Image: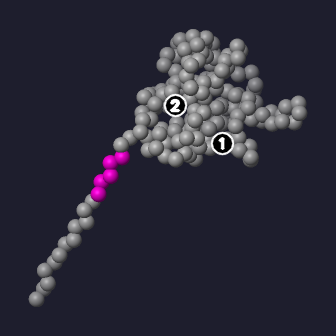
Amino acid sequence: MKFNKLSNDFVEKTRDLQEVLEDKGRGYSVAEITYNDLTFAVPLRSNLEVDSKGKPKKIGGAPTSFVADIQIGENGEKFHRGLDFQKALLISDKESDFGNEYPLSDNKQKTTINDNEYEILKQFKRYVNSYVRAHQKDLPYKQQFYRSTLQNYHDELDAHKKEVKIMVKKKRTIVKPDDE
């Protein structure tokens, strides 16, 4: 999997989008994921949201992140590190949107992510598909995606509410004449 930093121009261009992570001056590294001919920048984060069992939170059956490892803080607090699907950004021009290639320095995290690339792609696909389906069909759990940056890309994802056409089949009864 390829890791990059986002360019300063891209960070500035996306600053006002809904739910975008705030750049605290150090930039943040992202994994490059391509799905449906769209390239996404999925940020590496050090404090992912997990359930009581330490598993990634799910929305509509789809995981919201991929946990690569767990770090223990000074006070014994656990930090789940990995990829945050909820904060994925759509990349329109790799040349200008990505800055430098980012050599992930944490070998354990890098190895876990690279060893699980197929699983990560599968989970990210489930997350995007769940998001799109929830918005197209106006499913009850769509409100749980309120933290997702995908809300900025409805046109690109074709995530607009679809009209549902209900087709009613008429039941035909075949009447056979009595045999006399």
Give residue 97's quadrant in the image: top right
- Secondary structure predominantly adopted by residues drawn in magenta: loop
Q: Position of residue 100 (x, y in %)?
A: 63, 13
Please report the residue visible at 53 percent of the width from the left and 11 percent of the height from the top: 96
In the image, is residue 165 part of the stretch drawn in magenta?
Answer: yes
Residue flagged by tag 1: what amino acid is it? Lys
Q: Position of residue 58 (x, y in %)?
A: 62, 44
Separation of residues labelled 2 and 1 (CA atoms): 18 Å
Q: Secondary structure at mark 1?
A: loop
Mark 1: few, some, or many residues within 10 Å (few <14, many ≥20)? Answer: some
Q: Quadrant of the C terminus?
A: bottom left
Q: Earlier in the sequence, mark 2 or mark 1?
A: 1
In the image, residue 108 sits, relative to residue 161, either above or below, namely: above
Mark 2 = which residue?
151
In the picture, measured across the screen, residue 170 lies left or right of residue 1, that is: left
Please report the residue visible at 25 percent of the width from the left and 62 percent of the height from the top: 170
In the picture, measured across the screen, residue 97 lies left or right of residue 75, that is: left
Please report the residue visible at 27 percent of the width from the left and 59 percent of the height from the top: 169
Q: Which residues are magenta?
A: 164-168
Mark 1 = which residue?
57
Q: Position of residue 37 (x, y in %)?
A: 45, 28
Give residue 69's quadrant in the image: top right
Residue flagged by tag 2: what amino acid is it? Gln
Residue 102 seen in this snapshot: no
